[in-house]
Amino acid sequence: MREPQAGYTEEFEVNMGPQHPSTHGVLRLLLRMDGEIIKNAEPHVGYLHRAIEKICENRTYPQCIPLLDRFEYVTSMSTEEVFCLAAERIAAIEVPERAEYLRVIMLELNRIASHLIFLGTFSLDLGAITPFLYCIRERETIMDLFEMTCGQRLTYNYIRVGGVSQDIPEQFMPLARKFVDTFQARVDDYEALLTENPIFLARTKNVGIVNKQVCLDYGASGPVLRAAGVEWDLRRDDPYSIYDRFKFEIPTGTVGDVWDRYMVRVRELRQSNEIVRQALDQLPTGDIKAKMKPLFKPPVGEVYARIENSRGEMGCHIISDGSTKPYRLKLRGGSFCHTQLIPEVAPGIMIADLVAMFASLDVILPEVDR
Amino acid sequence: MRLELSPLLKIIGDWISSLGLPTWLVDLIEMCGAAAMVMGMAFLIILFLVWWERKLSGHFQQRLGPMRTGWHGWLQTIADGIKLFQKEDIIPKTVDRKVFYWAPVICFASSFAAFACLPWGKNLWPTDLNIGILYIFAITTFVVISLLMAGWSSNNKYALLGGMRSAAQIVSYEVPLTLSVLGVIVATQSLSMVAIVGAQEKVYNWFIFRQPLGFLIYLIAATAETNRAPFDIPEAEQELVAGFNIEYSGMKFAMFFMAEFLNLFLVSAVAVTLFLGGWHGPFLPSWLWFLLKAFFIVFVIIWFKWTYPRLRVDQLMEFCWKFLLPLAFLNLIVAGFLFR
C-alpha cells in the first residue's frame, strides 16, 4: 500500500449496476473514476440473456411471436411486426389492407407508449419525478386500447403472419380518437415542465454529445442518429407496410447532445400521433388476415426485414429451410448498438452526465442481452 | 379570545414553584418539561410532514397518495415508523462501527438542538439566547459532520461520494445563507430571535418586504442546506443510489430521515421568524400563526422538489459561488445603507 502524500489522489473503480436505479434493468457499468469524473466506462451486458434467437429455432413460426414479445418488451408490437414482415416476405404473402392499417395504428401507438416511457424515465434520471407519472397516465390509455384489442397490456401476440389476430372492438375507435385529439396538449404539458427549464437545459445542452461520425461508425440508428443531424427514417427511406401513404415529418437535431435526443423524441411523439390520426381516418373495412394454409410452411429462402423501431433500426434475418420452424433467426436492435456508444462518450464527463447520457440513449436491456 | 398557550404554561410553572421544592429542582423540572414539550412537538411535526409530503407529492402527480391507513392515510407515518422500528439493524462488516453508530445520532441531535431557540408564539419559547440566530446556524452545521461521518464510515464508494458532495454543498451554501440573514440582523441590531420577531409587529414591517432579495437568497440557500431538490445531489438516487445513507437501515436510517424533516421545518421556521413576522398575525392564536407560516414555507420547498430536475454537482457550486454569493453581498451592502 502506498503512503498517502499531500495532494495525492487515487482513481477508484465503481460498479454501477446491475442493481442500480438508473441502469434501466440490468446493465453493469464498470466505471473508473477520478472523484466525480469518469475516466473510463466499460459496459458489461448479458445478465438477461435468454437465448431467444436459439429457442426460436425450435419453435414454429406462430410460436415464435409470443417469445419475441419478450425481446423488446417496451415496444412488443414492433418485434412482432418485423418478424411477421420477414416471414411474409419469404412466403410472399399479401397482407389485407385493413390488417396493414391496424398494424400501423398499433405500431405508432406503441411508439408513443415507448417514447412516453423514455420521457418519464429520462426526466426521472435527471431528478424530475413528476413528469414520469404524467407520462404513465397517458401510456395507461394506450395500454387500455391494446388490452381491449388483444387482451394483453405488454406482450401482445397481436400481429400474426399474414395479418393480425383479431379486429378492434367497437369501443376502440372512440377512445383512440379521444386520445389522439387530446394528446398534443398533453405533450405541451410535458414540454412546459422540461423543455425550457433552465436546470433542464443546464443538464442536457452540450452534454453527452454523440456526433454524426460516431453515430455512423457505431451503427447508431433511430432518434440517436437523427439527433446528430442525419435525416434517416426507415418508414420513409425504406418503406414497409403502408407507411408511404402517410404524411409525417422526420424531426432531426443538430449537435447530437442529450437535449437533441430528447427533443427529437418529443417531436416524434407528435408525429406518431398524426400518423395514428391519419390511419384512423383512412381505416378501410375488409379482412384482417390473409387466406393461408393452416400450417405455415415458407419455402426455402433467406430474408432480412427491417423496420423503424422507437429505438432505431430493428431487423430480423430469417433463414428458412422449408420446414415449419426457422432454420436460423437473427435479430438486430438499436439498443445493442447504442450501448456501445457509452465507452466512446463517457470518458471525461461526470457521473451525473453519464446517467443523463445513458437515459437519453433509451437503451432497453432485454433487447441488448437477447 | 385567542387561545394562547403561554398563560397556561405560566400557571403550571407557578404551581411547581409553589410546591416548596428547592430552587435547583424547580429549575431542573422546568428545563426538562420544556425540553420534553419541544421534543414532543418535533415528533408531531415529523409525523405530519412525512405524511404531508407524501400527500402533496401524490396530488402534484395526479395520484391520491396514502389512503389506506386511517382517514386519507393520516396514520401512514406511524405505520412507517413501526415498520422501520421492527427492521433488522444491519451493520455491514467493513464499516467503522463507532463512527457509523454515532453519525445518525449527531445528525438528529444537532437538528433537534436548534429548536431550543425558536419563538413558537407569544411569550412561548424554550430559551431566548441573545445570540439565537448564530446559535441555530452554528448547531445545524453539525449535520455536515454527521453526513460526512456516515459517508466515510460506511466504507462504500457511493456513500463516500454522497458524503463528500453533501460536505461541499452544505459548507458552500452556508455562506450565502448566513449573508442573507445578516441584512435582517443589521436592521434589528440584534441576534436574538425574540427581538427579531419583536421588530416585525406590523405586516409592513415584515422583513420579506424590507429585504425581499434576502428572503429569496435565504429560501434558495435553505433548500440547498436541507439537501432538497433541486439541490438533492448528496442523495441523488439516480446517480448514487441513496448517497450517504446507503448502508443504513432500520432505526438508524429513520434517524437520518427524521433529521431531514426536522431540518426542513427548522429552516422554514427560521424563515418565518426572520422574514415573515414570526408569530405575529391577526385573529388566530400566535402559535398557530407560527405553524401555519412555517408549513407554508415547507409547502413551497416541497413544491420545488416535485417540479424541478436536479442540478449537477459542479453547476450547484457555480450557482452558489458565482451567483448567489455576489447577490448576497449586494443585498448586505444595500441593507447597510438602508438601515444605517
Image (cartoon, helix red, strand yellow):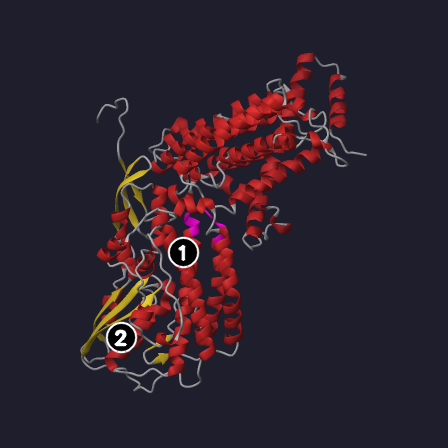
> Badge 1: few (under 14), some or many (20 or more) residues near its Cα, within 10 Å?
some
- Label 1 amino acid? Met
Residue found at x 47% / y 63% = A139
Q: Which residues are magenta?
A: A123-131
Query: Considering the numbered disc 1 on the image, is that residue within a helix, a strand or a loop?
Result: helix
Q: Is residue A268 above or below residue A278?
A: above
Above or below, B93 relative to A45: above
Q: Is residue A127 magenta?
A: yes
* Quarter of the figure with residue B93: top left
Q: Label 1: which residue?
A: A263
Q: CA distance from mark 1 to mark 2?
A: 32 Å
**Whole-percent x and y of residue A70?**
34, 65
Q: Position of residue A365 (x, y in %)?
A: 32, 57
Which residue is rendered at x = 29% and y = 61% of the image?
A221
Q: Is residue B297 magenta?
A: no
Which residue is tagged 2? A86
Residue B165 to residue B309: above or below: above
